[in-house]
Amino acid sequence: MQLDRKVLDELSAKETAAWDSLSKYKFIMFGYHAAIWVTLNRIHRCHQRNPFLDVVKLAKLKIEKIRHPGSFGQ
C-alpha cells in the first residue's frame, strides 16, 4: 500500500501549504492547494474529512449575515 501512504503524505503536504498560504494572506494560493487536496481526496477515495470545512461553514454564515442582516440574533 505504498500508493496509499504517498497519497496521504501528499494530502498532508497540501493541507499544510494551504493553511500556510492563508496565514500569509495568499488567498489564491490557499485556494490552489485546497483544491488539490479536495481533488486528491476524491479521486483516490481517501474519505478524509475536509480540513477546510470549518472555513467554508464560516464563509457561508458570513455571506448569509450580509445578505440577510436582520435575520441573525434578533
Image (cartoon, helix red, strand yellow):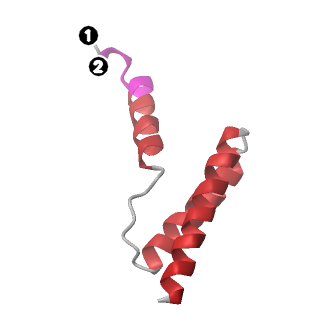
Residue wearing tag 1: 74
Relative placement, left or right, of 72 versus 22 is left
Q: Which mark is residue 38?
A: none
Instruction: Look at the image and tell me in which quarter the C terminus lies.
Output: top left
Q: Is residue 71 above or below residue 55?
A: above
Structural crowding at the residue carrying mark 2, measured as other residues with C-alpha within 10 Å and reported as few (<14), some (14–19) or many (≥20)? few
Q: Nearer the viewer, residue 68 or 9?
A: 9
Residue 9 vs 53, above or below: the answer is: below
Check if residue 29 falls in the magenta segment. no
Residue at image point 45% right, 24% down: 66
Q: Quadrant of residue 12?
A: bottom right
Residue 69 magenta-highlighted = yes
Tell me the kind of residue under disc 2. Answer: Ser
Say whether residue 13 is left or right of residue 56. right
Coordinates of residue 35 in the picture (x, y in percent): 57, 62
Tally the numbered discs. 2
Q: Callout 1, which amino acid?
A: Gln
Name the outermost residue toward the top. Answer: 74
Kind of element beneath mark 2: helix
Identify which residue is drawn at 48% across, 82% down: 4
Q: Main secondary structure of the magenta part?
A: helix
Label 2 sits on residue = 71
* Residue segment shown in magenta: 65-71
> Where residue 18 sits in the image (x, y, percent)?
63, 53
Q: Secondary structure at mark 1?
A: loop
Q: Residue at x 44, y 29 (%)?
A: 62
Question: Vertically, is 24 above or below 33?
Answer: above
Q: Which residue is the extreme one toward the left?
A: 74
Q: Residue at x 62, y 55 (%)?
A: 16
Given contact means CB atoms under 8 Å apart, are the residues at marks 1 and 2 in contact?
yes
Q: 63 or 5, which lies in front?
A: 5
Q: Quadrant of residue 14?
A: bottom right
